[in-house]
Amino acid sequence: MNTKLKILIALVTILNPLSLSLYILTFEKCRKEWLWFRYKEDICEYVRHDDKHDDYLDEPGFGGVFKAIETYDRRTNDSLKMDSLLVELLKFRNKKGEIQCNDIHLATLIYIDKTRRYHLLPYIKAIRDSFASYPKDTIYYSKNSDGVYDTNRNFKENIDTYIESFTNELKK
């Protein structure tokens, strides 16, 4: 076989859609494991660094954060650690004093609703009060883990609907 034919066969094999999808799956799995081992001591950073916008299989922002929260819950299987993570993610500002992204707050609220952790209602009210101190048409920017600025809005009304829903569930 001549070398041109060998190169052609190698390129067809490498660029085969099945091979390419396997490479992408392997890359994603390795990246998730690397993030877990790098940030498992500071799980809030793990969640914040799982918001990559360049993933092939993960949704950017919200989807990545939500999957990171689910992964942490699945891997630790510790209710107390999970509650402390959710409380930390519900804060208006992170440890560095920066306002957190709407994706983090929304993913946390949906996860609380999904897992029925209604005992965290006081923390949800606290974040609503933090948003209430700003005009309702406020637009702010938060930096994601890639250093890209995301546009966020005051979403106090969305938090109010969750609080109302959680309060109704607690009354039942």
Image (spheres, helix red, strand yellow):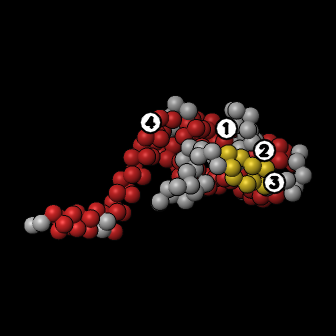
- For this rendering, which residue is in front, 8 or 19? 8
**Amino acid under label 2?**
Ile
Q: In the displayed structure, would residue 8 be above or below residue 43?
A: below
Task: Calculate the distance from the C-alpha at mark 1 to the C-alpha at mark 4.
Answer: 20 Å
**Amino acid under label 1?**
Glu
Are dots 1 and 4 in contact, CB under 8 Å? no
Q: Residue drawn 43% across and 46% down?
A: 31
The residue identified by callout 3 is 139
**Amino acid under label 4?**
Phe
For marks 1 and 4, the one nearer the N-term is 4
For marks 2 and 4, the one nearer the N-term is 4
The residue identified by callout 4 is 37
The residue identified by callout 1 is 88
For marks 3 and 2, the one nearer the N-term is 2
Task: Calculate the distance from the C-alpha at mark 3 to the C-alpha at mark 4.
Answer: 35 Å
- For this rendering, which residue is in front, 12 or 90? 12
Residue 129 visible in the displayed image? yes
The residue identified by callout 2 is 127
Q: Quadrant of residue 160?
A: bottom right
**Amino acid under label 3?**
Ile
Are dots 2 and 4 in contact, CB under 8 Å? no
Q: Quadrant of residue 98?
A: top right
Q: Residue drawn 85% across and 53% down?
A: 138
Q: Position of residue 8 (x, y in %)?
A: 22, 68
Q: Position of residue 81 (x, y in %)?
A: 57, 35
Q: Position of residue 56 (x, y in %)?
A: 47, 60
Q: Residue drawn 66% across and 42% down?
A: 89
Q: Which mark is residue 15?
A: none
Q: Secondary structure at mark 4?
A: helix
Extreme left residue here?
Answer: 1
